[in-house]
Amino acid sequence: MTIEKQRKLIHDIANNLSVVDSNLTLVIRSLTKNHPHLSQEIDRLKKVSENSGVAINALRELRTIIAESSPT
């Protein structure tokens, strides 16, 4: 796999995770507003959102590392 294909794959994965995280944020807001009695589930979803943010940042860092290590 070429470096460009690696970077594109990492970019695509990060973008998909960003969409997931964005939708997850909307669900958390809605549940918090409309179903506060589901606090345990809301807390679990918040942890999922935090972890997806970590994964997104790791992929972005990996993409940068690949770009910096590639021959110009």
Image (spheres, helix red, strand yellow):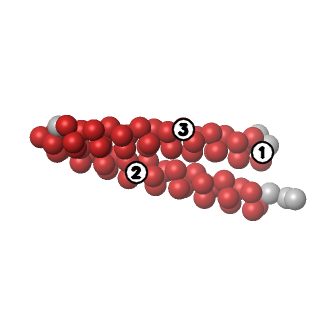
Q: Earlier in the sequence, mark 1 or mark 3?
A: 1
Kind of residue at disc 3: Asn
Whole-angstrom CA distance, mark 2 to mark 3, is 14 Å
Whole-angstrom CA distance, mark 2 to mark 1, is 27 Å
Which residue is located at x 68 percent, y 60 percent? 65
Toward the front, the furthest residue is 33
Query: Is residue 58 toward the left or the right of residue 1 in the image?
Result: left
Kind of residue at disc 1: Glu
Which residue is located at x 57 percent, y 45 percent? 14
Q: Which mark is nearer the camera, 1 or 3?
A: 3
Say the numbered circle drawn on residue 16. Answer: 3
Disc 1 on helix, strand or loop? helix
Residue density around tag 1, few if under 14, some if 14–19, many if 20 or more, within 10 Å: few
Say the numbered circle drawn on residue 51. Answer: 2
Toward the left, the furthest residue is 37
> Looking at the rendering, which quadrant does residue 38 occupy?
top left
The N terminus, quarter of image:
top right
Say the numbered circle drawn on residue 4. Answer: 1
Q: Earlier in the sequence, mark 2 or mark 1?
A: 1
Disc 3 on helix, strand or loop? helix
Disc 2 on helix, strand or loop? helix
Q: Is residue 8 above or below residue 61?
A: above
Kind of residue at disc 2: Asn
The C terminus, quarter of image:
bottom right
Q: Earlier in the sequence, mark 2 or mark 3?
A: 3
